[in-house]
Amino acid sequence: MCLLALCAASLSLLISCQHAKGGAVGSRKVIVLGIDGLDPDLLTKFMADGKMPNFARLAAQGSFKRLTTSIPPQSPVAWSNLITGMNSGGHGIFDFIHRDPKNFQLYFSTSRVEGPRHNLRLGSWVIPLGSGSAEQLRHGKAFWEILDEQGVPNYVYRIPANFPPVAAKGKTLSGMGTPDLRGTYGTFTFYTDDPTAGLGEVEGGEVVLVDVKNNRVASNLIGPDNTFRRNSPPSVEPFTVDVDPLEPVVRIAVEDQQFVLKEGEWSGWVPVEFKLMPLIGSVKGICRFYLKQTHPRFQLYVSPINIDPRNPALPISTPSDYSSDLAKQIGEFYTQGIAEDTKALTAGVLDDKEYLQQAHEVLSEHRRAFDAEFPKFHDGVFFFYFSSLDLNAHMLWRLTDPQSPAYDAALAAQYGSSLEEFYQQIDQVLGEVLPKVDDNTTLLVLSDHGFAPYRRSFNLNTWLLNNGYIALKEGVSENASEPLANVDWSRTRAYGLGLNGLYLNLRGRERQGIVEPGSQADALLSQLRQKLLAVRDPKDGSQVITRIDLASEAYQGPYARAGPDALVGYNRGYRAGWKTILGAFPAEVLEDNTNPWSGDHCIDFTKVPGVLLSNRKIEAQAPALTDIAPTILAEFGIAKTRDMMGQSVFQSR
Amino acid sequence: MAIAAFKFFLLTSPLAIVVVLSVAVGVLMVVLFGYTSDQEAIGLTKDQVKAHLLAVRLYRDQIPVVMSSYGKILRGTGRYLKLSFKPLLWVIIPITFLVVQVDRYLGAAPLPPNRPFLLTVHLAGQTSDAPNDVTLVLPSEITMTAPPVHVPSENAIVWRLVSSKEGKYEVKIATLGRSATKAVRVGSDLTRISTVRLRGQFWNRMFFSAEPPLPENFPVESISINYPERDIQIAGYGMNWIWPFFILSMVAGFIFMKIAGIRI
């Protein structure tokens, strides 16, 4: 009897301890909808027009504020601010791309994937003596790591700058920054028998010439580089397309799968296995086909080969089998970080209608995932990310902006409301969430930045060259295949890389640095700031650059000096040109942007704030992205870490 | 109620069928082997082989003895194979036909409703004019979702179809004034599925088709449907039924062999 009583007491103690562990938690819930690029001005307009009733209801019953974005306002930087509660000085992410100051090689800022260090060469084969690695380059603790430590359950869907995903107890799926199977941000392939179609590599893709022989096309899907072979040629997987001699329809055969596509149709996800070494090595991916045309020219688009969520070749989720579980629930889905194929639209491989079909499918996948996961959420934190408003604002802005050099009245009449329709879909998602928000739930709906038109490109490196800050080697042209390869570093004082980065050629940091750190560097930065702020557009006299932030003023933390020395903040309507970002020198300093990529946010951060809506009263007058992690933690009574800069937006300051 | 549910499970669960079938086949294999083999001779041969194996270990320092034992082991193994051949035939032939029949239920799954599938007709002869004359007659529940693809290099025509409802249907293929049908199974139940209907080709029909042959004068070699493969789920892993069947029947046979005292 005594033994029984002792057991009962122990059991009671155990249960009470379990409660104490999550004591502050109870059934407290925090729902965060992270909506990339949701613009406060557009939101205000659509709410006023009655197009976004759920957002209007939330704003009326709770709070709606502009959310100060990151410096610079680029997604990897902004989401890292949100994740860690620190700015770039703390988490070390300054841009989409970073450079190695010793050799000026560019690399993705958020992650690094490397093959094995040691290999054994046997003839044409290379046998790896170890495994490769995928490393996340963002520093600092993610808010869900702290929640894990405190026993607060959490779910994090596709938050950017989390590839490979940090170790977590909850379910997480990596988002922006996750590569395709070729290790790029997304490389499509376009197969055509038209020899005038601009064959070879195009930005974000590859155009492959094929023969239609006896109504059959035989070609290869292009996979990852085969590191088992000497010189690592790309792995390939053959496929055939049988074209009906008369009708606009084909049969496609890949491995043991066959399917029929009509002209203008998308396939579902098709699994593909790239064999790297017989019996030993293979990787699995998935791709989608789009039959653009059969006659008179054959045109077939194949999406970037995505990591197969059922058999991921790289870590994309926690636990590692979560991506497979999700695929079982909703079917295969895009795993690459930037799923909307903006590059195919830019290259003219997809037209607006085709791009929109693809972009809608991406949002449908996100919504299927949301519908599968949200009903399971009962306790802790639920974070869900949507990419659609950002990428579609980038591509569709020109259809709503008659001042855009890429504006086309006919296209505007046809697709001018498309961006608004994406906003309305996000409003529908909020409509699913609101009924589940009770007194014990805090809802945060936020975006990392807003949006602005991108009408004119400013070529920073050309300006630096024209103004004597960059000198080129004698007898060479400005542009080379490698970034800044023709620059004479012994006579160069500053250079631009990335969307907003301005670097000094600093002695002791750059390989051939000539600018002395300290007063000389400070004076140069001051001079550059003054001159850049004075740049006017000869077209209409507009100020091109409205803000220059010095790293020494903008950043705090151990990595504050690891990035650019200054951040160029462009005026609305302007942005760094595509080529200058990668260290090239286009002829003109300022030029029209005729690219479909016609909206942007990589400008003066004060001009593109994000949004923050909540069902609770936001006390902070000027909430910032760095406040979000402390806010989430505070909702569970968890103190922010020492490194975190912000504080809960629900506390008055 | 529980017993009824269990019976229902047994009748409809592919895994339950595989388990029951494997055990039954394992036992049957051993019984058949026991009845059709010379148990005494097999026992004697195996004992002799074992004795010579022992001799190899015991007299490893005496080369002539070891070599002689190796020779006898080889001879004994040959004799064992000879003694096993006839009973193995008695076992393998019926099991092969049984496996073929079971595969028609467990090898493929019916087509899911509202999901496209392909119906492929391979025409007879390489120079036939038939491709342009082939027509497809569909029941109202099945619709064509794309024009047919003519594949001249394979003398084939491929239709993409979709069924709106579960059920057992027949589609009619007509050409040059003649016609034939092909069964289509849509749903999720455990049903007998024929992935292909063939003309002639006796052995292919025996192993791959579950339908009567196409008429000899019909200018079509085959009519096939790309049914999805059926996976048996074991501990979260999907696999073809033949793998658990192979392993479980061996285990069952081995256990029963010991119990029944049958030597294999």
Image: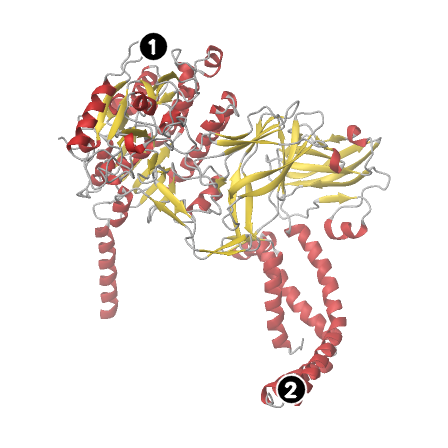
Structure colour scheme = secondary structure
Instruction: Return the residue at label 1.
Output: A539
Q: How many marks?
A: 2
Q: Quadrant of the C terminus of chain A?
A: top left
Residue occupying the point 33% across, 49% down: A167
**Which residue occupies the foreground of this view, A517 or A395?**
A517
Which chain does the numbered disc 2 sit on? B
**Residue A59: image tag:** none
Whether residue A519 is visible, yes or no, is yes
**Which residue occupies the foreground of this view, B136 or A240?**
A240
- Residue A38: percent from the left, percent from the top? 33, 25
Residue A98 falls left or right of residue A12: right
Whether residue A64 is visible, yes or no, is no
Amino acid type, callout 1: Lys
Q: CA distance from mark 1 to mark 2?
A: 101 Å
Q: Quadrant of the N terminus of chain A?
A: bottom left
**Residue B66: image tag:** 2
Graded by Cα atoms within 10 Å as few (under 14), some (14 to 19) or many (20 or more), the crowding at tag 2 reads many
**Which residue occupies the foreground of this view, A463 or A448?**
A463
Which picture quadrant has residue A470? top left
Which chain does the numbered disc 1 sit on? A
**Which residue occupies the foreground of this view, A120 or A484?**
A484
